Image: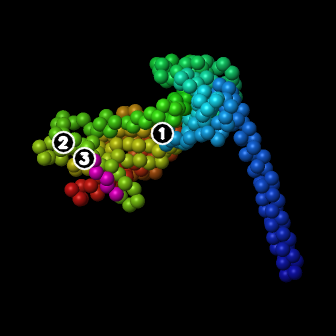
Amino acid sequence: MESTLKNMILTLLIITLVSAGALSMVFSMTKDAIEQSKSAKTLEALEGVLLPFDNNPATDTVTVEVNSLPIKVYTGRKGGAPVGYAVETITRKGYSGDIRMMVGFDAAGDIYNIEILEHSETPGLGSKIADDNNPVLVSFKGRNPADLVMKVTKDGGDIDVITASTISSRAYTDAVERAYTAYRTVALGEEQAAPDINDYLPVTEQMPDNSPADEAEVVAVGSKNYRVYHGVRDGELLWVAVESVSEGYNALIRMLVSFYPDGTVFDISVIEHMESEDYGAVIEDSDNPLRASFVGRNPGDMKLLFRYEGGEVDGISGSSITSQAYMDAVQGAYKAFGEYMSNR
């Protein structure tokens, strides 16, 4: 019996080792093929979105960050002079996930062509974003984004939508807008415009007589740093506003949480986010349930859990990760507020 058990264990061990070796061999054999396939697909997309070039754009690239996402810009040249730029862009606002695209600009900044690299949109509906001459592509092709209102017509913009696929059409537009920002950064040397913090600082009955944006301080809480602004009038502290960042569903969420001196939340503003349309993007709304849970209350007096967990915070339906990120940002801001007040 003992001998049989040992043989069984030995046999299983041998099978495991052989299986692991086989998997490793298969991975090694297919890895190069996968990489070659990706390179070929990228080159094909470059040829489809750029005017004729005689260089290798795949080796003439720059990666820039737009809204916390890395965006690769390829330069097509002929006779050494740029003929256009191909931007490998991404949106995380698709109906079924990420959409990766290649957007080609000519030397003047007009869109020459756009090709879809990857998507998971619904077949027969959102998947039409990959069709030649679909209405979203037609809205962009041959036009300069500077001359367009970069929103779908349903939202008051210039971009036509694919029937019954508004979310996919919005996502497509979002990716093109990000590509245009990257194009301007690389081709024109423009600096990306950062949100003006003054647009988000509290507006109260008594306005400060200091310059909060110029007098910001950095407060450390554990391993995180928070930028803290304060409003003062006639030497009296009116409010403290804390810039807080958390990891959302798609990318970082940047918020400004404003407190009265006693720790009561006066206001919460979302400065930047990449959350999905009709879902996590609700955090932008002034009447969203998360904001309503905090404004007028002191987080130190609250049970910072969601209602379904027995707490006092209302989340956004269908957006648990975004809701958690929002609550984490407020909680972090409150800790930074406490640290700031204790050292004031």
Which residue does the image show at 27% across and 55% down from the upper left? Answer: 340
Q: Are marks 2 and 3 in contact (CB under 8 Å)?
A: yes
Q: Position of residue 342 (x, y in %)?
A: 24, 59
What type is the residue that disc 3 sits on? Glu
Which residue does the image show at 38% across and 42% down from the upper left? Answer: 255
Dot 2: element: loop
What type is the residue that disc 1 sits on? Asn
Q: Residue furthest front?
A: 79
Tell me, for residue 67, which label it has, or none. 1
Mark 2 and mark 3: Cα distance apart in space: 8 Å
Magenta span has 110? no
What type is the residue that disc 2 sits on? Asn
Mark 2 — residue? 210
Which residue does the image show at 48% across and 48% down from the upper left? Answer: 247
Q: Where 77 falls versus 267 (above or below)?
A: above
Q: 10 Å neighbourhood of mark 1: few (<14), some, or many (≥20)?
A: some
Left or right: where does residue 234 sit relative to residue 244? left
In which quadrant of the rendered view does residue 194 lie?
Answer: top left
Range of magenta residues = 216-220
Quarter of the image with the N terminus in it? bottom right
Mark 3 — residue? 215
Disc on the earlier residue, 2 or 1 = 1
